[in-house]
Structure formats: C-alpha cells, structure tokens
Amino acid sequence: MNKDLSNNTSEPLYRQVSERLLSEIQAGQWAVGSVLPKEVDLAKLLSVSRVTLRQALDILEKGGVIRRVRKLGTQVIAQDMAKRYTQRMDNLDNILRLAGQTALRVTGLATVQGTPDEGLRDHQSVTGHWLAVTGVRHLRGSNTLSTWTQVFLDNKFAGVAPLLEQEVDSVYQVVEQVYGLSVHGIAHRISACVLDEPLARVLGLPVGSAGLQVQAWLTAADGTLIEYVRSVHNPDLISIEIQTQREPG
C-alpha cells in the first residue's frame, strides 16, 4: 500500500484516497485543467483497487473538484471542494451519497426507552431500548457544520458504539459492516423548521431562522428498520433536488 495511506485508522480507505488526491491537486501536482491518469494507472499508482479509486473519485466529482469528460478522461476543474451540496433523490445510490460528501462527528450516545421521537411512533424496538446517536456533519474540505442529526437504532445494534468514536460516513454503514445488513429502501419526510437556540448555535445561524428538516427511515430487504434519522440542515449549505418521470403508457 502507498505509504501515505494507512490501515491504522477508522477512516475508510476511499476517503483517505480522496483526501490524498485533493491535497495533491491543491499542491499543484494535478493542476486545474489537467487530466488525471487512467483509472487503471492511477489505482496502481496509489496501490488501491479500482473500486476504491472510483469511490474516491465520486467524492471529488460530487464536490466539484473533478469531472469525467467523454473521450478525454477525468479532468481537474477546481482546487477546493464545493461549499454547498445538493442531495439528489432520484435513486437510492444518490440518496445515500450525502454520507460520502459529508462526515459525521458523533457528539453523544445514549440508551433510551419508549418512543423517544415521533418518527418512531409506528416502530417498536425488539430489545425495548433504542441506541440514540447524536452528531453533527460538515462538508468535506470544510470545518463549517452543515447538519445536526440524531440517529435511532434498535439496541440490538449497540455493538457499533465503539466504532463511532471517530468521524464516520454514516451510522447505517457501520451497521452494515458489523451486522452484514444492507439498506434496501428509504422513506423520507422533508419539512421546514424554525431553529431554536441550541440548533441555531450548532449551525451558526440566527435563532428563529429557517432550517431544512429531513426524517428518514432506512429499512432492510425484509422491511425491518435499520435506522431512523432526523437531520436539520443549514439550507445555505445543503439543498435537496427531487426528480421523477411519468410512467409510460
């Protein structure tokens, strides 16, 4: 493995690769306007798989640093990540991509009973307890907080807690890795909200200003709930784009 990439960290390898490439771009090794080596060559240069490299390039592409140009390759178009992110809700992969464009810093863990959030009103915990994970998100390449979030998991998934001590892409991905599950479906509820003093302070906005609230229910293939999450975004940094098409006929 390339000496600048390490297994001695909880940060996923593809994120290490994206940060490595971004630092090289910022240092001028890959100038704006230049074209990166072909994927097979760049993966070999970094001593990573092409799958890992593609995940890393996806972060940089969605961050506005590179773009893929047909018959040309991957071109560098900026030295810094975009200062805002649009979450596209046209398919499952794009919906989940927010986890790669932002990093989650966990600020609190607690075990709770009952119905700690109205979004869990129609769901029961198998264990009778929920693991409540509170945290904040920031866009890649920026320390400005974009999102306050709270995730609820059945306490049967409490084994993920030690893995949340450092920044992660998302809680559900840790659950997938530890318990061998995968997200099969997501339901969303999007609304505006008024920021109270604690939320306004976290997001660096005036008290009483508008926030973008998103509730999401992530389910496995058998319909069981993997996680419920309530997030409040700074609308200046995170927006949502929904696309759909009329069925033919």
Image (cartoon, helix red, strand yellow):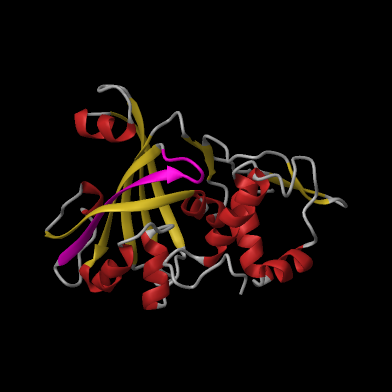
Answer with the quarter of the image where residue 123 lies: bottom left
Residue in the foreground of this view, choosing between 137 and 179: 137
Q: Quadrant of the N terminus?
A: bottom right
In the rendered image, is residue 202 in sight? Answer: yes
Residue situated in front as seen by the camera: 23 or 96? 23
Rendered location of residue 115, percent (x, y): 15, 54
By secondary structure, the bulk of the magenta-drawn segment is best described as: strand
Please say whether residue 241 is visible from this viewpoint.
no
Residue 141, magenta (yes or no): yes
Q: Is residue 2 depicted above or below 99 in this figure?
A: below
**Compared with residue 240, is residue 114 higher up or lower down, i.e. above or below?**
below
Position in image of residue 223 (x %, y %): 38, 67
- Start and end of the magenta stretch? 129-143
Relative to 195, is 168 above or below?
A: below
Quarter-wise, where is residue 161 in the image? bottom left
Q: Position of residue 117 (x, y in %)?
A: 20, 49
| Apparent side of residue 234 relative to residue 193 in the rendered image (left or right) | right
